[in-house]
Image (cartoon, rainbow, N blue to C red):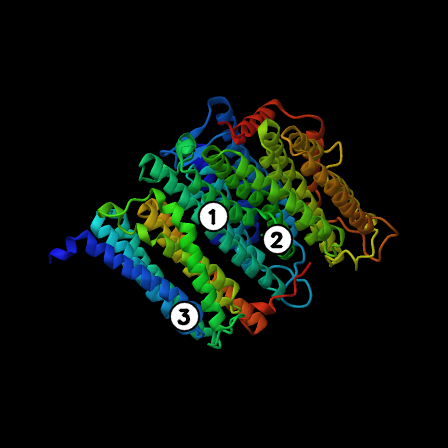
Amino acid sequence: MPFLNDPLFGQTMITLMAAVVLVLQITLVAQKSLVASIYVFAVQSFLLAGIAGTIAWFTGAGHLYLAALITLLLKSVLLPAILLRLVERIGIEHEMRPLLNVPVSVLISGMLSLLAYVVAEPLQHGLSYGGPAALGHNTLPVAVALFLIGFFLMANRRKALSQVLALLSLENGLFLAAISLTYGMPLIVELGVFFDALVAVLVLAILVGRIREAFDSMDVTRLSRLRG
Amino acid sequence: MPLAFLLAIPLAGAAAVFFARRRFVLELVYGTGAGAALLSSVFLAAQVLSGGPVSFFNGFLYADALSALVTLLTCLVWALSAPYTVGYLRGPQPSAGESPAQLGIRDLRLYYTLSLLFVFTLLAVSLTGNLGLMWVALEGATLASVFLVAFYGKPTSLEAAWKYAIIGGVGLSMALFGTILTYYAAHEATGMETWEALNWPFLLAASPQFNPLVMRLAFVLVLLGYGAKAGLAPMHTWKPDAYSEAPVPAAAMMATAMLNCALYGLGRFFLLSARATGAAMPSQLLVLFGILSIAVAMPFILVQRSFRRLLAYSSIDHCGIIALSLGFGGPLGSLGAVLHMSFHALAKPLLFFCAGNAQQHAGDDSLRNTAGGLIRVLPMSGAALFAAVLAVTGTPPFPLFLSEFTVLRAGFAQGYGWVSIIAVALFVLIFSGMFAHVSRLLLGPAPDLPAGDRNRWTVYPLLPLAALLLLFSFWMPAPLSSLLAQSAALLEVKP
C-alpha cells in the first residue's frame, strides 16, 4: 500500500485525529453523564496514541512508539477502567451538574479554542511546514486549546471525579503539545510523567472514596468548612 | 558517591518501615535515616565546596553549591524534626472520632512510610540535574504529601487534601507545559534530542540562544506552577488548610523543605529565561508575585483565629520575601534569597513544634478559645515560641533580620525603592499581628490546665533549633558562609 509511506497522507490523518480530539474535548464540556465522559476521555486518549504512533511511523522516532503504546495502555485502557470501577463501587449519581449551563460552556470552549490559535501562532513561527520533518506541527493550537478547555472544565465541575477527569484531559493537551513541538519529551522524562499520572489517579481515586464516605457526597462545593 | 547514597537512604528507609512490625523499629529507622542523610549532605556540601559541581551518570544526578545547600537544608530539617516526630506521634492525636486517641501501629507505619517517600522526592528535586526529572520529583512530592495532609481522616483533613491535590495538580501541569516549552527552545537552538538536553549545565550554557518568545511563555507557566507549589499568592489558598490539617511534623517539612524545593526549581527557570529574554520581564514578575504574597498574607495574619493557619500565612509571607529578593536580583538580591531560605528553614520548624506542643496540651488550635497564660504551664515550649516568633518576624538579633535587611538593601540598590518601602510597612504590620496573637496566647494568668512539657521527646528537640538560630545570629562558620555565597552567585543573573 503505497499511501502508507506518503507523508501527505500522514499529515492528513494527524490533522483529522487532532480535530476529533478537540471535538471530544468540547464534548466533555457538554457531556452531563460521568460514565459517558470517561468513555469520551478514553477515545480521546486512543486518538492521541494514534497521533503519536503515526508520527513515529513517518519519522522513525523509536521512542515515540513507546510513548504511543504507554498512552494507549495507560490512558485509554487502565485509567478509564480505574475510574469506571470507582464510579461503580461507590455508586455515584451520574448527573454532573456543572456550574454554568451547557450552551454557555460550549460557547466559552469555542472562544478558548480561538484564544489557543492566537497564543500558539507566534510560537509556531520557527516551525517548518511541509515534508516529513513537519509532521504534526500544526497540532500545537489544538494542544493549547485542550489545555485551556481543561482548565475551564476543572473550574466548571462540582463533582470530585469529574475534576479528576478534567485534570487528565488537560494532561492530554500537554502530551499533544510535547509531540507537536519536539516529537515528545525525552523518554526518561516521559516515563516519569506517565508514572506520575498513574499514581495521581490512584491517589485521587482513594481520596474521592474517602471524601464520599465522610461527606456522603462527591460534591466539592460542600468542602467549604475551612475558611480564612 | 554521596549523591546516590543520599537518595538511597530515605528509599531504603521507606521499604524497611513498610515491613516493620513494631513502633520502636519505625522510630529507629526514621531517626537513623535522618542522621545518616544529614551526614552525607554535609559531606556532599564539603565535596562541592572543595571540588566544584559533582555529577553522576551523565548529569542524571548533579549537585552544585545551590543544590547542595537546598539538600543540606532538607536533611537538616528532617534530622532536627525526627526526634520531635517520634515524640509528637506518641502523644494523643486528633482522629475522625470525637476525642483524641493514640495512633495504632498501622497508622504509624503509614505515616513514617509516607514521610520517608516525601523526603525522598524532595531530595530528588534538589539532586537531579535534569529539569524534566525535577518536575517528576516535585509531582511525586505532591502525591506523597497529599496523604500526609489527609492523615487524620477527618472531614476537614479530606477537604484540605482535596484542595491541595487539585491546586497542586493544576499548578504542576502548568509547570510541565513550561518544561516542555523549555525543552522545545533547547531543541530548536541546539538540535539536541536526548534527555541530556534538559540537563542543567547544558541548558544554562545554551540559554542565551533560546527563542525569547518561547522562554517568556515558559517562565510564566513555570512561575504559576512552581509558585503554586511554593505558595505564592494568588495560588496560595491550599496552604492554610493543608498546614492546619497535616500532622505538625509533616506540616513543618512542607513549610520549609518543600517550599525551598519549589523555589529552587523556580530559581533555575528564572535564570534560564532571564538569560534568554533579558532579566527585566522575569524579575518584574517575581517582584510582583512576591510583594503580592506579602500583601495578601498581612490581613489574614492580623485577624487570624487559628494558630497553625497563622503559621501558614506567615509562610506565604516568607515565600513572597524570597521571590521578591530573587526578583530584585543583583548580588545582594540573590544573597538575600539564599539567606532567607536557609534561616526560614530553621525558624519555621521551631514555630510549628511549639505550636504543636501547645495544641497537644490545650487540645485546641484556636487563638480565641485558649484562655492565655500558656507560658505558665508550658515554660519551655512557651519561651521557645516567643523566641521563634521574634525570629520569624525578623527581629534583631535573629538571623532573619539580617536576611530581610539584605533583601531590602537589594531592593533599594536595584531601583525598586517604592516596593521596598511597601515591604517594610507590611513587615511592621505582620510583626505586630504575630506578636499580638502570641502574647495573647502566652501571657496572662495561669489557665485552668495541668502543668505540661513533660514529654522529653517533644521538648528537647526544640533546643537544637533554638540554639542554631541564636548561633547564626552572632556567628557563621566559614564553610557555611562560603556555601551560601557560592549559591547566591549561582542564582545571580549574569549575561
Can you give x and y, in whole percent of width and height, for residue B357 in the image? 71, 50
Mark 2 — on which chain does it sit?
B
Q: Label 2 vs label 3: CA separation?
A: 31 Å
Tell which subunit mark 1 falls on: B
Q: Are marks 2 and 3 in contact (CB under 8 Å)?
A: no
Mark 3 to mark 1: distance in Å?
A: 26 Å
The mark closer to the camera, 2 or 3, is 3
Mark 2 = which residue? B239
Q: Which residue is mark 1?
A: B175
Q: Residue at x 24, y 51 (%)?
A: A56
Amino acid at dot 3: Ser
Q: Residue at x 42, y 59 (%)?
A: A113
- Label 1 neighbourhood size at 10 Å, few (<14), some (14-19), many (20+)? many
Please name the residue that numbered disc 3 is placed on: A37
Image location of residue B293, percent across then percent down? 64, 46
| Residue type of the residue flagged with mark 1 | Ala
Instruction: Say above or below: A77 vs B421.
Output: below
Residue in the picture at 36% in, 33% down? B58
Q: Are marks 3 and 1 on the same chain?
A: no
